[in-house]
Image (spheres, rainbow, N blue to C red):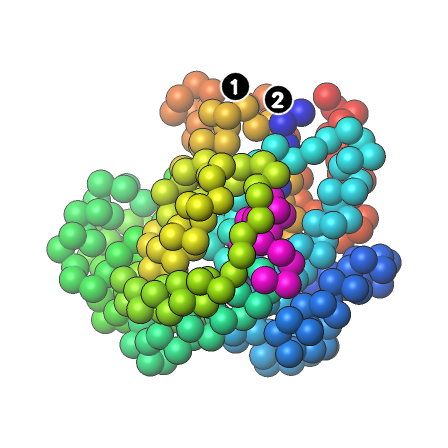
Amino acid sequence: MKAALIYPGQGAQHVGMCRGFYDGYEIVRELFSEAGRATGLDISELCFTENDRLDLTEYTQPCMVCAELAMTEVVKAELKKRGIEPAVSAGLSLGEYAAVSEAGALSFADAVRLVYERGKLMAGAVPKGVGAMAAVINPDITVLKEVLDATEGAWIANYNSPAQIVITGYKEAVELAVSRLTEKGVKRCVMLNVSGPFHSPLLKEAGEKLGEVLEDVSLGKLSHPYYANIDAARVEDESLIKERLINQVSGSVHWQQIVEAMLDEGVDLFIEVGPGKTLSGFVQKILRAEAKDKGRDISGIKLINIETPEDISKIDGVLEEK
Protein backbone atom coordinates (compact mmCIF):
# COMPACT_ATOMS: atom_id res chain seq x y z
CA MET A 1 0.00 0.00 0.00
CA LYS A 2 1.13 3.56 -0.68
CA ALA A 3 0.41 5.49 2.51
CA ALA A 4 0.07 9.22 3.12
CA LEU A 5 0.08 10.75 6.59
CA ILE A 6 -2.17 13.81 6.73
CA TYR A 7 -2.50 16.37 9.52
CA PRO A 8 -5.41 18.66 10.48
CA GLY A 9 -4.99 22.35 11.16
CA GLN A 10 -6.29 24.89 13.61
CA GLY A 11 -9.89 24.39 14.62
CA ALA A 12 -9.63 20.65 15.30
CA GLN A 13 -8.10 21.17 18.74
CA HIS A 14 -9.95 20.23 21.91
CA VAL A 15 -9.12 19.80 25.57
CA GLY A 16 -8.00 16.22 26.13
CA MET A 17 -6.51 15.67 22.68
CA CYS A 18 -3.66 13.14 22.72
CA ARG A 19 -4.37 12.20 26.35
CA GLY A 20 -4.56 8.48 25.65
CA PHE A 21 -1.21 8.53 23.88
CA TYR A 22 0.31 10.65 26.67
CA ASP A 23 -0.84 8.23 29.35
CA GLY A 24 0.20 5.15 27.42
CA TYR A 25 3.55 5.97 25.83
CA GLU A 26 6.76 7.28 27.36
CA ILE A 27 7.92 8.75 24.03
CA VAL A 28 4.81 10.94 23.94
CA ARG A 29 5.42 12.24 27.46
CA GLU A 30 9.03 12.97 26.53
CA LEU A 31 7.97 14.94 23.46
CA PHE A 32 5.46 17.00 25.47
CA SER A 33 8.29 17.87 27.86
CA GLU A 34 10.55 18.77 24.93
CA ALA A 35 7.83 21.01 23.48
CA GLY A 36 7.58 22.75 26.85
CA ARG A 37 11.32 23.42 26.90
CA ALA A 38 11.22 24.69 23.32
CA THR A 39 8.34 27.13 23.91
CA GLY A 40 8.35 27.87 27.63
CA LEU A 41 4.72 26.68 27.78
CA ASP A 42 3.15 23.93 29.85
CA ILE A 43 1.86 22.01 26.84
CA SER A 44 0.31 19.17 28.84
CA GLU A 45 -1.65 21.61 31.01
CA LEU A 46 -2.90 23.46 27.92
CA CYS A 47 -3.94 20.22 26.23
CA PHE A 48 -5.42 18.31 29.14
CA THR A 49 -7.03 20.76 31.58
CA GLU A 50 -10.07 22.93 30.98
CA ASN A 51 -8.81 26.38 29.98
CA ASP A 52 -9.59 29.32 27.72
CA ARG A 53 -6.14 29.49 26.13
CA LEU A 54 -6.13 26.39 23.96
CA ASP A 55 -8.36 28.13 21.41
CA LEU A 56 -6.11 31.20 21.24
CA THR A 57 -4.02 31.05 18.07
CA GLU A 58 -0.62 31.43 19.73
CA TYR A 59 -1.33 28.50 22.06
CA THR A 60 -3.36 26.37 19.67
CA GLN A 61 -0.55 26.09 17.17
CA PRO A 62 2.25 24.62 19.33
CA CYS A 63 -0.23 22.37 21.14
CA MET A 64 -1.64 20.96 17.91
CA VAL A 65 1.74 20.34 16.30
CA CYS A 66 3.10 18.78 19.49
CA ALA A 67 0.10 16.46 19.77
CA GLU A 68 0.19 15.47 16.10
CA LEU A 69 3.90 14.72 16.05
CA ALA A 70 3.77 12.86 19.36
CA MET A 71 0.97 10.65 18.02
CA THR A 72 2.98 10.17 14.84
CA GLU A 73 5.88 8.57 16.73
CA VAL A 74 3.55 5.80 17.87
CA VAL A 75 1.65 5.52 14.60
CA LYS A 76 4.81 5.19 12.49
CA ALA A 77 6.19 2.51 14.81
CA GLU A 78 2.95 0.57 14.48
CA LEU A 79 2.93 0.99 10.71
CA LYS A 80 6.52 -0.23 10.50
CA LYS A 81 5.58 -3.40 12.40
CA ARG A 82 3.07 -4.04 9.63
CA GLY A 83 5.54 -3.36 6.85
CA ILE A 84 4.23 0.09 5.93
CA GLU A 85 6.39 3.21 5.55
CA PRO A 86 4.76 6.57 4.74
CA ALA A 87 5.41 7.52 1.13
CA VAL A 88 4.26 11.15 1.38
CA SER A 89 2.75 13.55 3.89
CA ALA A 90 0.71 16.74 3.94
CA GLY A 91 -1.13 18.93 6.38
CA LEU A 92 -3.83 21.56 6.15
CA SER A 93 -2.48 25.02 7.02
CA LEU A 94 -0.89 24.60 10.46
CA GLY A 95 -0.75 20.86 9.80
CA GLU A 96 1.84 21.46 7.09
CA TYR A 97 4.43 21.94 9.84
CA ALA A 98 3.67 18.48 11.23
CA ALA A 99 4.01 17.08 7.70
CA VAL A 100 7.38 18.78 7.12
CA SER A 101 8.65 17.58 10.49
CA GLU A 102 7.37 14.02 10.02
CA ALA A 103 9.20 13.96 6.68
CA GLY A 104 12.45 14.86 8.44
CA ALA A 105 13.08 18.45 7.33
CA LEU A 106 12.19 20.09 10.68
CA SER A 107 13.22 18.83 14.08
CA PHE A 108 10.41 18.38 16.59
CA ALA A 109 11.67 21.24 18.76
CA ASP A 110 12.02 23.59 15.78
CA ALA A 111 8.52 22.70 14.56
CA VAL A 112 6.77 23.56 17.83
CA ARG A 113 8.93 26.64 18.37
CA LEU A 114 8.22 27.88 14.84
CA VAL A 115 4.46 27.50 15.10
CA TYR A 116 4.47 29.23 18.49
CA GLU A 117 6.07 32.24 16.80
CA ARG A 118 3.77 31.81 13.79
CA GLY A 119 0.73 31.84 16.05
CA LYS A 120 1.82 35.03 17.80
CA LEU A 121 2.53 36.74 14.48
CA MET A 122 -0.82 35.69 13.00
CA ALA A 123 -2.76 36.68 16.12
CA GLY A 124 -1.20 40.14 16.12
CA ALA A 125 -1.31 40.79 12.39
CA VAL A 126 -4.76 42.38 12.22
CA PRO A 127 -6.72 44.11 15.02
CA LYS A 128 -9.51 41.99 16.47
CA GLY A 129 -12.79 42.43 14.63
CA VAL A 130 -11.24 43.76 11.43
CA GLY A 131 -11.07 40.46 9.62
CA ALA A 132 -13.36 37.47 9.15
CA MET A 133 -13.69 34.13 7.40
CA ALA A 134 -16.66 32.20 6.05
CA ALA A 135 -17.20 28.68 4.73
CA VAL A 136 -19.09 28.51 1.44
CA ILE A 137 -20.90 25.18 1.14
CA ASN A 138 -21.35 23.48 -2.24
CA PRO A 139 -20.21 26.53 -4.21
CA ASP A 140 -20.16 27.02 -7.94
CA ILE A 141 -16.48 27.94 -8.26
CA THR A 142 -17.09 30.17 -11.29
CA VAL A 143 -19.77 32.16 -9.45
CA LEU A 144 -17.61 32.34 -6.33
CA LYS A 145 -14.66 33.77 -8.22
CA GLU A 146 -16.88 36.27 -10.01
CA VAL A 147 -18.23 37.49 -6.68
CA LEU A 148 -14.78 37.77 -5.13
CA ASP A 149 -13.44 39.62 -8.19
CA ALA A 150 -16.22 42.16 -7.62
CA THR A 151 -15.67 42.36 -3.84
CA GLU A 152 -12.57 44.27 -2.85
CA GLY A 153 -10.93 42.92 0.30
CA ALA A 154 -12.18 39.32 0.14
CA TRP A 155 -10.24 36.30 -1.11
CA ILE A 156 -10.24 32.50 -1.17
CA ALA A 157 -8.49 31.10 1.90
CA ASN A 158 -9.00 27.34 1.52
CA TYR A 159 -9.95 24.98 -1.27
CA ASN A 160 -10.97 22.27 1.19
CA SER A 161 -13.08 20.05 -1.04
CA PRO A 162 -15.59 20.37 -3.90
CA ALA A 163 -18.21 20.86 -1.18
CA GLN A 164 -16.44 23.58 0.82
CA ILE A 165 -14.37 26.64 0.05
CA VAL A 166 -13.43 29.14 2.75
CA ILE A 167 -13.21 32.87 2.04
CA THR A 168 -11.26 35.41 4.05
CA GLY A 169 -10.55 39.12 4.28
CA TYR A 170 -11.91 42.30 5.80
CA LYS A 171 -15.06 41.59 7.84
CA GLU A 172 -17.25 43.93 5.81
CA ALA A 173 -15.96 42.49 2.54
CA VAL A 174 -16.52 38.88 3.62
CA GLU A 175 -20.05 39.70 4.77
CA LEU A 176 -20.75 41.47 1.47
CA ALA A 177 -19.41 38.49 -0.48
CA VAL A 178 -21.63 36.15 1.53
CA SER A 179 -24.64 38.36 0.78
CA ARG A 180 -23.83 38.42 -2.93
CA LEU A 181 -23.32 34.64 -3.03
CA THR A 182 -26.67 34.12 -1.35
CA GLU A 183 -28.31 36.36 -3.95
CA LYS A 184 -26.73 34.21 -6.67
CA GLY A 185 -28.19 31.02 -5.28
CA VAL A 186 -25.57 29.68 -2.88
CA LYS A 187 -27.74 28.06 -0.23
CA ARG A 188 -25.36 27.98 2.71
CA CYS A 189 -22.52 30.19 3.92
CA VAL A 190 -21.25 29.97 7.49
CA MET A 191 -19.31 32.73 9.23
CA LEU A 192 -16.44 31.08 11.12
CA ASN A 193 -15.45 31.72 14.72
CA VAL A 194 -11.84 32.72 14.07
CA SER A 195 -9.59 35.42 15.44
CA GLY A 196 -8.43 36.82 12.12
CA PRO A 197 -8.51 36.76 8.31
CA PHE A 198 -6.10 33.85 7.93
CA HIS A 199 -4.62 33.00 4.53
CA SER A 200 -5.30 36.47 3.15
CA PRO A 201 -2.98 39.20 1.87
CA LEU A 202 -3.69 41.00 5.16
CA LEU A 203 -1.20 38.59 6.77
CA LYS A 204 1.62 39.20 4.30
CA GLU A 205 3.68 41.11 6.85
CA ALA A 206 3.24 38.29 9.36
CA GLY A 207 4.64 35.89 6.77
CA GLU A 208 7.61 38.15 6.17
CA LYS A 209 8.33 38.28 9.90
CA LEU A 210 8.06 34.50 10.05
CA GLY A 211 10.70 34.44 7.33
CA GLU A 212 13.06 36.24 9.68
CA VAL A 213 12.49 33.54 12.29
CA LEU A 214 13.04 30.84 9.67
CA GLU A 215 16.43 32.29 8.79
CA ASP A 216 17.84 30.79 11.99
CA VAL A 217 16.33 27.35 11.42
CA SER A 218 18.40 24.59 9.84
CA LEU A 219 16.49 22.13 7.68
CA GLY A 220 17.24 18.43 7.57
CA LYS A 221 16.98 16.09 4.61
CA LEU A 222 13.53 14.97 3.57
CA SER A 223 13.05 11.22 4.03
CA HIS A 224 10.13 11.37 1.61
CA PRO A 225 8.26 14.13 -0.27
CA TYR A 226 5.48 16.23 1.21
CA TYR A 227 2.84 18.36 -0.48
CA ALA A 228 2.82 22.13 0.10
CA ASN A 229 -0.35 24.12 0.78
CA ILE A 230 0.51 27.16 -1.30
CA ASP A 231 0.67 25.38 -4.68
CA ALA A 232 -0.08 21.69 -4.03
CA ALA A 233 3.46 20.95 -5.22
CA ARG A 234 5.21 17.68 -4.35
CA VAL A 235 8.27 19.00 -2.50
CA GLU A 236 11.45 16.93 -2.63
CA ASP A 237 14.03 19.73 -2.38
CA GLU A 238 14.60 21.11 1.13
CA SER A 239 15.70 24.47 -0.27
CA LEU A 240 12.11 25.13 -1.41
CA ILE A 241 10.48 24.65 1.99
CA LYS A 242 11.05 27.98 3.74
CA GLU A 243 9.63 30.11 0.92
CA ARG A 244 6.52 27.96 0.83
CA LEU A 245 6.01 28.24 4.59
CA ILE A 246 6.39 32.02 4.39
CA ASN A 247 3.90 32.37 1.53
CA GLN A 248 1.47 29.95 3.14
CA VAL A 249 0.61 32.46 5.88
CA SER A 250 -1.04 34.85 3.42
CA GLY A 251 -1.79 32.51 0.51
CA SER A 252 -4.58 30.08 -0.27
CA VAL A 253 -4.56 26.50 1.02
CA HIS A 254 -4.98 24.04 -1.86
CA TRP A 255 -6.09 20.98 0.09
CA GLN A 256 -8.38 19.57 -2.59
CA GLN A 257 -5.59 19.85 -5.15
CA ILE A 258 -3.13 18.15 -2.77
CA VAL A 259 -5.40 15.14 -2.34
CA GLU A 260 -5.99 14.93 -6.09
CA ALA A 261 -2.22 15.00 -6.67
CA MET A 262 -1.71 12.23 -4.11
CA LEU A 263 -4.33 10.12 -5.87
CA ASP A 264 -2.55 10.70 -9.18
CA GLU A 265 0.65 9.53 -7.48
CA GLY A 266 -1.02 6.29 -6.48
CA VAL A 267 -1.70 6.88 -2.79
CA ASP A 268 -4.28 4.32 -1.68
CA LEU A 269 -4.14 4.71 2.11
CA PHE A 270 -4.79 8.07 3.79
CA ILE A 271 -4.08 8.18 7.53
CA GLU A 272 -5.26 11.30 9.35
CA VAL A 273 -3.24 11.73 12.55
CA GLY A 274 -4.58 14.18 15.10
CA PRO A 275 -7.79 15.29 16.77
CA GLY A 276 -11.07 15.02 14.92
CA LYS A 277 -12.03 13.79 11.47
CA THR A 278 -12.01 17.05 9.51
CA LEU A 279 -9.57 15.94 6.84
CA SER A 280 -11.17 12.52 6.55
CA GLY A 281 -14.42 14.29 5.70
CA PHE A 282 -12.72 16.43 3.08
CA VAL A 283 -10.96 13.42 1.53
CA GLN A 284 -14.22 11.47 1.34
CA LYS A 285 -15.90 14.33 -0.54
CA ILE A 286 -12.92 14.66 -2.88
CA LEU A 287 -12.97 10.92 -3.58
CA ARG A 288 -16.68 11.00 -4.40
CA ALA A 289 -16.16 13.93 -6.76
CA GLU A 290 -13.24 12.17 -8.44
CA ALA A 291 -15.37 9.08 -9.01
CA LYS A 292 -18.37 11.06 -10.26
CA ASP A 293 -16.65 13.69 -12.40
CA LYS A 294 -13.55 11.86 -13.62
CA GLY A 295 -14.56 8.25 -13.44
CA ARG A 296 -11.74 7.43 -11.04
CA ASP A 297 -11.93 3.97 -9.48
CA ILE A 298 -11.86 4.66 -5.74
CA SER A 299 -12.85 1.16 -4.59
CA GLY A 300 -9.33 0.30 -3.41
CA ILE A 301 -8.60 3.57 -1.63
CA LYS A 302 -8.71 3.40 2.16
CA LEU A 303 -9.05 6.21 4.68
CA ILE A 304 -8.62 6.06 8.45
CA ASN A 305 -8.26 8.61 11.22
CA ILE A 306 -6.19 8.05 14.34
CA GLU A 307 -6.77 10.24 17.39
CA THR A 308 -6.63 7.64 20.20
CA PRO A 309 -4.41 4.59 20.77
CA GLU A 310 -7.45 2.39 20.18
CA ASP A 311 -7.71 3.76 16.65
CA ILE A 312 -4.44 2.02 15.71
CA SER A 313 -6.46 -1.18 15.26
CA LYS A 314 -7.99 0.49 12.19
CA ILE A 315 -4.69 -0.20 10.38
CA ASP A 316 -5.23 -3.94 10.79
CA GLY A 317 -8.78 -3.58 9.56
CA VAL A 318 -7.54 -1.95 6.35
CA LEU A 319 -4.86 -4.59 5.83
CA GLU A 320 -7.41 -7.37 6.28
CA GLU A 321 -9.62 -5.77 3.63
CA LYS A 322 -6.69 -5.71 1.23
Q: Which residue is mark 2?
A: 300
In the picture, the quarter occupied by the N terminus is: top right
Does the residue at mark 1 contact the one at mark 2 (Cβ under 8 Å)?
yes
Q: Nearer the viewer, residue 47 or 300?
A: 47
Furthest-left residue in this view = 150
Residue 6, numbered label: none
At x 64%, y 63%, the residue is 109
Relative to 199, is 237 on the left or the right?
Answer: right
Q: Name the image quarter holding residue 258.
A: top left
Residue 305, horizontal then vertical, whole percent: 66, 45
Mark 2 surroundings: few (<14), some (14-19) or many (≥20) residues within 10 A: few
Query: Is residue 248 shown to the viewer in this render?
Result: no
Residue 252, horizontal then vertical, whole percent: 34, 52
Residue range in magenta is: 97-110
Residue 74, horizontal then vertical, whole percent: 77, 49
Please determine whether, in this image, residue 201 is positioned above or below residue 243: below
| Amino acid type of the residue tagged 2 in the rendering | Gly
Provide the secondary structure element on which disc 1 rests.
loop
Please determine whether, in this image, residue 182 is positioned above or below residue 37: above
| Amino acid type of the residue tagged 1 in the rendering | Asp
Relative to 111, is 197 on the left or the right?
Answer: left
What main secondary structure does the magenta stretch of the protein show?
A: helix
Q: Nearer the viewer, residue 126 or 121?
A: 121
Residue 66 belongs to magenta span: no
How many numbered markers are drawn? 2
Q: Which residue is mark 1?
A: 297
